[in-house]
Amino acid sequence: MSVRLVKRLLQQTSELDANSRQENEREKSRASHRSKRKHAKQAPVPVDEKEVVRHQVESLLFLDRKVSSKNSKKMATSARLRENQSKQRHIEKSTAKKVLGNTRSASSALITKPVPTFNKKKYNKQKEEKRLAQIAKLLKKNSAKK
């Protein structure tokens, strides 16, 4: 291609680009103008005091819902993270590091969980509570039948 043709093509493309940029700017300004008009139309001016109060209450409720949903989500995720971290710490503490060997220090390093012993008083108390719960349930059925 000759230099003249190349210059002519470049000039035409730059003119097309300039025209398209101007059209895009016009469309953006029109769109923003339309959106401003829509917002102005959507918010009618309240006439009497009841409508003013109702409008204020609705706007406050809307904002409250938005803020509370964000806060509740944040609080739920942070609580879940804290719970997972505490579970991990508990697992790490409960697992004993086992050391192979037959020395006194190795055997004392093994951490064993304490095993609860049988307690007669506690067992009798639980047994009595179960019996009383059954009696209460039967009395409730009998009173419902009458």
Image (tube, rainbow, N blue to C red):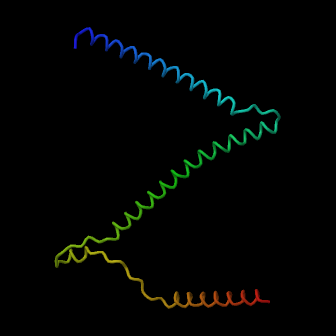
Which residue is at the front of the view, 52 or 109?
Answer: 52
- Looking at the picture, how far across and down is residue 129, in whole percent? 60, 87
Q: Which picture quadrant has residue 110? A: bottom left
- Looking at the picture, how far across and down is residue 128, in whole percent? 60, 90
Which residue is at the front of the view, 48 or 13?
Answer: 13
Q: Which picture quadrant has residue 141? A: bottom right
Quarter occupied by the N terminus: top left
Please indicate whether residue 13 sits to the left or right of residue 97 in the image. Answer: right
Residue 46 against residue 17 in the figure, above or below? below
- Looking at the picture, how far across and down is residue 90, in whole percent? 38, 67
- Looking at the picture, how far across and down is residue 81, in whole percent? 44, 57
Residue 98 against residue 46 in the figure, above or below? below
Tally of numbered tags: 0
Please indicate whether residue 24 sits to the left or right of residue 35 in the image. Answer: left
| Residue in view at x 35 percent, y 77 percent | 113
Q: Which picture quadrant has residue 57? A: top right
Please indicate whether residue 36 sits to the left or right of residue 109 in the image. Answer: right
| Residue in view at x 46 percent, y 58 percent | 80
Quarter occupied by the C terminus: bottom right
Residue 136 against residue 88 in the figure, above or below? below
The residue most toward the top is 4
| Residue in view at x 55 percent, y 52 percent | 72
| Residue in view at x 37 percent, y 63 percent | 89
